[in-house]
Image (cartoon, rainbow, N blue to C red):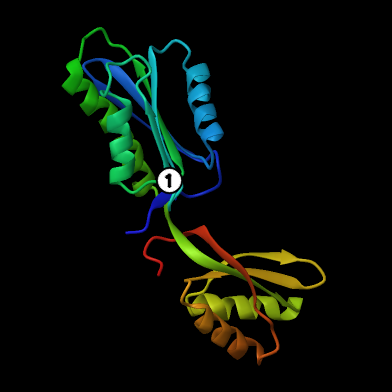
Amino acid sequence: MSPLTLRGGPGTRVEAEIEEKRSRFLCRLVRVTREEEARAAVENARKEHHDARHHCSAFVLGAGQGQIRRSHDDGEPSGTAGAPMLEVLTGHGLVDCVAVVTRYFGGVLLGAGGLVRAYSGAVTAAVDQASSQGRLVQRVRRELASVDLPHADAGRVEADLRGHGVLVLGTEYGTQARLQLACAPDGVGHLRHRLAAATGGTAELILHGQEWVDAELGAG
């Protein structure tokens, strides 16, 4: 299964809340691209909920080699918050996300097992929220390419490519329309064929190398 992340750019977030023996656990799941952004998301939660006792966190950055995983218990007993939160993220295949769970203490001690269930449950609730709202997309390795077209042809060619499974990332408009495209690493030949068929062989495909990009769930 391809890794998943939140739809949208850095800063996109989903929130959920659960209660355990009168303690409130508020989770925010935020899309990030760097450790600095993940740590900033934790600090934002700390500022917004400055009267809360704990702001525990976990994040996963990157989908390939060199992936970074971090977690922090923020004063809770070791291993009862950050690590279970990280397990939920990795278990659901989430990347480029930080989960921050803010706890408002309800006066009843939960014990180690109760804390693990609450912190993991809060992150699970946020992931479920994102899934039910259609807020999750795949992260897939794709060959990036572009093609310049006359403005009058851009819409028709884009529709043809989309209809044959080509991922169109966007369009830039200048003296010509530049379609930003992506395909599977083994699909460049298919892309060239479709482009030639759609333009009568007049358009030139420019390759830009491979990158991780967002794709709809179930996309090839």
> What residue is drawn where x is 38% and y is 18%?
74
Picture layout, residue 11 above or below residue 6: above
Q: Name which residue type carries label 1.
A: Gln
Find disc 1 in the rendering and name its residue. Answer: 67
Q: Nearer the viewer, residue 61 or 161?
A: 61
**The image quarter in which residue 174 lies:** bottom right
Picture layout, residue 165 above or below residue 55: below
Residue 174 falls left or right of residue 142: right
Residue 204: in sight, yes or no?
A: yes
Q: Nearer the viewer, residue 97 or 170?
A: 97
Q: Nearer the viewer, residue 89 or 197?
A: 89
**The image quarter in which residue 77 lies:** top left
Residue 66 falls left or right of residue 108: right
> What residue is drawn where x is 27% and y is 31%?
84
Image spot of residue 134 (x, y percent)? 40, 52
Q: Residue furthest right?
A: 175
Image spot of residue 12 (x, y percent)? 52, 41
